[in-house]
Image (tube, rainbow, N blue to C red):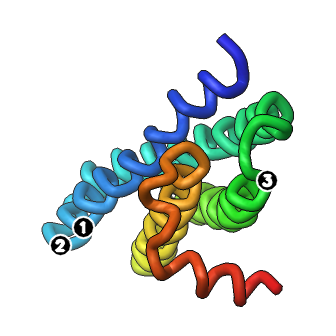
Amino acid sequence: MNAIHLHLILNHFPTVGFIIVLFIFLHGLYRKNEEFNFVSLWFIIVLSVITIFVYLSGEGAEELLKNKLDKEHIEIHESFGKISLYLSIVLGLLSAFSLITKKLRWLVLILLIINILSLGITSFYGAQIRHEEIRNLPIKKEVRNYER
C-alpha cells in the first residue's frame, strides 16, 4: 500500500464522518443530552486527527502522481485541502476544550458546519483529478478567477 491508496481510503472518513457526527451533535444539543454531546465531541476529535493523516497522505500521493496527472487540478484540491486541514484542527481543539469545560457548544456546531462545507468542496475538487466528466461544471471557472 502506498500514499495514494492510503489517501483514497482515509479521505472518506472525515468527509462522511463529520456529517454523521453533525446529526448526533444536533440531537445532543436539542435534547440537552450530555452523553450524545460527549460522544460527538470525541468523534470530532478523532476525525480531526484522521484529517491530518489524510492531508499528509495527500502530499505523498501528489509526489507519486505529479508527472501523470494535470497539475492544475491537484493544486486546486491541495489549496482547499489545506483550508479543510486547518479548520479540522481548530475544530478538534475547540471540541477538546468544549469537552472539558462544557462550554462553546454552539461555536463547535457552527465550525462543524463550516468544516463540512469545506471538506465537501475539497472532495469535489479531489474527484476532478481522476473524473474528467465533472471537470466542466461552472463552479470551477469561479475558483480559477479567485486564485489568480
The Cα–Cα distance between marks 1 and 2, rounded to whole angstroms, is 6 Å
Q: Which residue is mark 2?
A: 30
* Mark 2 burial class by Cα count in 10 Å: few <14, some 14-19, many 20+: few
Amino acid marked by disc 3? Lys
Position of the C terminus, as image quadrant, is: bottom right
Asked whether, in this view, residue 82 is left or right of residue 137, the answer is right
Q: Nearer the viewer, residue 135 or 109?
A: 135
| Residue 57: image location, x then y, percent | 72, 33
Q: Which residue is mark 3?
A: 71
Q: Nearer the viewer, residue 4 or 108?
A: 4
* Mark 1 burial class by Cα count in 10 Å: few <14, some 14-19, many 20+: some
Residue at 63 percent of width and 62 percent of height: 84
Residue 131 sits above or below residue 140 on the image: above
The Cα–Cα distance between marks 2 and 3, rounded to whole angstroms, is 45 Å
The Cα–Cα distance between marks 1 and 3, rounded to whole angstroms, is 39 Å
Q: Are marks 1 and 3 in contact (CB under 8 Å)?
A: no
Residue 77, label in figure: none
| Residue 138: image location, x then y, percent | 47, 81
Residue 26, label in figure: 1
* Mark 3 burial class by Cα count in 10 Å: few <14, some 14-19, many 20+: some
Amino acid marked by disc 2? Tyr
Asked whether, in this view, residue 38 is left or right of residue 31, the answer is right
Q: Could you tell which of marks 2 and 3 lies nearer the N-terminus? A: 2
Q: Could you tell which of marks 1 and 3 lies nearer the N-terminus? A: 1
Residue 145 sits above or below residue 5 on the image: below
Place residue 73 in its image quadrant: bottom right
